[in-house]
Image (cartoon, rainbow, N blue to C red):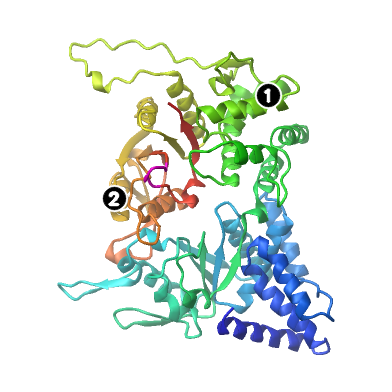
Amino acid sequence: WGLRNILSVLRTMGTTKRENETTNEALLVYRTVRDMNLSKLVAQDVQLFLSLLADLFPDESSPPKGHYPKEEAILKNVVKRHQLMYHDSWVLKVKQFYETTKVRHGIMLVGPSGGGKSCIFKCLKETLQESDGIQYKDVRFNPKSIRSQEMYGETDPMSGEWTTGIFAAIWAKYNSRNNAFNTWIIADGPVDAIWIEDLNTVLDDNKILTLANGDRIPMTDNVKIMFEVETLVNASPATVSRAGIIYVSDTDLDWEPVLKAWVLKRADPGYQALLETFIDRWIGKCTRVDPGPCFEFLQRNTAEVMREGRVGRISSFTQLFEGLTEGQETSFIVNNEKALERIFVYCLCWSVGALLEADDRSKFDRWLRDRDKSEVLPQVKQSETIYEFCVNSSTGEWEKWKPPKWTCPESDKLDFSNLLVPTMDSTRAKYIIQTIHRQKGPVLVVGAEGTAKTSTQVMFLAEQDPNEMLTKRINFSSATTPGMAQYAIEAELDKRGGKNYGPPNGKKMTIFFDDISMPEVNTWGDQTTLELVRLVIEHGGVYFLDKDKRGDFKTCEDLQYLAAMQHPVGGKNDIPNRLKRNFFIFNLVL
């Protein structure tokens, strides 16, 4: 709301006035002030801001929103091509982002995890590519997964030699007027008052990156710098005022469009209708004020062991449901409505209700039984819940979990401390890990001390075929730095060609991060080591730290991930919400 904002509003007003010379000026001011400031408000404040504007311009009726018929038509096709939903409140954010790109060269897309921010970047980039006929590239890096010196560059204290940084190398490479394409450089990581203050000269009208060795690299017109962040709580007003802000609230998208888009990807219309019936019956409908009866019940009546967004849990649900119904051995289930609904309820318990402790599991079980009109749920004894049952993949009937028969290995020297005996808990946990792992999805197991989180994962890893799948266990501690984590991953990889690296002999590898929540939380509330883990899982690689390859991305192929952590209570750390979003998470109870 400062002077810089007034300046951009005045510039936009000037452009609007030149395009509409005969229109009443008060109406143009009304429209520009509204359209340029609406994007940065949280959902709850939008109506308040609109009523303030209505008081300021009592004689004017609310002007129509900006209309871009050509871009909107292309956007519809792009959304359809990616099999997403053309959700009105999300599309409004894409439009606001487009309007901001026309008047700003530094833009921040802010909002909670699972709000559709990455899809906004992807869809608008492809829309502008078709609309302008010019190629658009996006270059992502995570500023918190590297040290500040590795980002901008550093001088060797012994030799005085200058080593350029990752961001400085990217900046120099893409800020060239000879490039026949436009580039969006996206900083995809938390903002703090240190690394982003160094970009102040880039974000204001100077548009110059100044480095410690005296280099001044100007920004060209074919480049924009963007930030994809969850919160601006650590950003200074000096930075925020220099950038255009688009705030994406969690209610702008929420879980329903994500689930609908997944249903529409199923080939058979009859199957789609059946899934929609199940969704209405068990999860409900979602509005801006009501997330649906299932989420409402869990929110009000249960205490989950850690916070996870609704979109993340629905994504986990779709992943588990796909794994249990869309394989060759389970093809008959698609035509068996009763078995399909049983699997639907089972997946609901182990995704949406996966973070409950034993007492709350009983509450959720009772709530499900109150809604069960057609006797889908299994018959249970006094102290049992639906969590003790699974659906048999060959018959489609409920079955109680039983651990496989275990025989003691015969040997003269038995190491009793390393013998792992399967239990009902470890068997059902292993079944879920196996289902998600088969689809190349990362799994995070949370639980209190002594719930066999590590043992369950170790038992699962021991069953992998060493001729196809290698395994590596990385133990995190409060002293683990991003550099250590990157080295631990890179040490196992061989070069496969170009900038692609992978496990030796063309095999695959599962990396198990034990105690993933342990790395230190810094002054700004960020865990830099976990930002590196997110970069590896989300984007499939890391940036080279070698002096001669700074600015190049190292793609790590054929890697899969498992993780374990304790409950984030009693002084124990939580992990970033944007990292949780990538994992299938469930809780192990005592």
Spot occupied by residue 280 in the image (x, y as percentages of width and height): 74, 36
Query: What's the magenta region?
Result: 568-573
**Magenta segment, principal secondary structure?**
loop
In front here: 15 or 170? 15
Q: Quadrant of the N terminus?
A: bottom right
Q: Is residue 336 visible?
A: no
Q: In the rendered image, which quarter is residue 272 located in?
A: top right
Q: In the rendered image, which quarter is residue 418 located in?
A: top left
| 100 lies left or right of 508 | right
Residue 436 vs 343, above or below: the answer is below
Q: Amino acid at mark 1?
A: Arg
In front here: 307 or 160? 307
Badge 1: residue crowd in 10 Å (few <14, some 14–19, many ≥20): some
Spot occupied by residue 11 in the image (x, y as percentages of width and height): 64, 86
Spot occupied by residue 547 in the image (x, y as percentages of width and height): 27, 65
What element does badge 2 sit on? loop
Query: What residue did someone put label 2 on?
Result: 480
Residue at point 49%, 42% (across, down) = 306
| 48 lies left or right of 177 | right
Residue at point 53%, 45% (across, down) = 308
Q: In the rendered image, which quarter is residue 464 located in?
A: top left
Q: Is residue 337 visible?
A: yes
Residue at point 45%, 26% (across, down) = 430
Disc number at residue 369? 1
Q: Amino acid at mark 2?
A: Thr
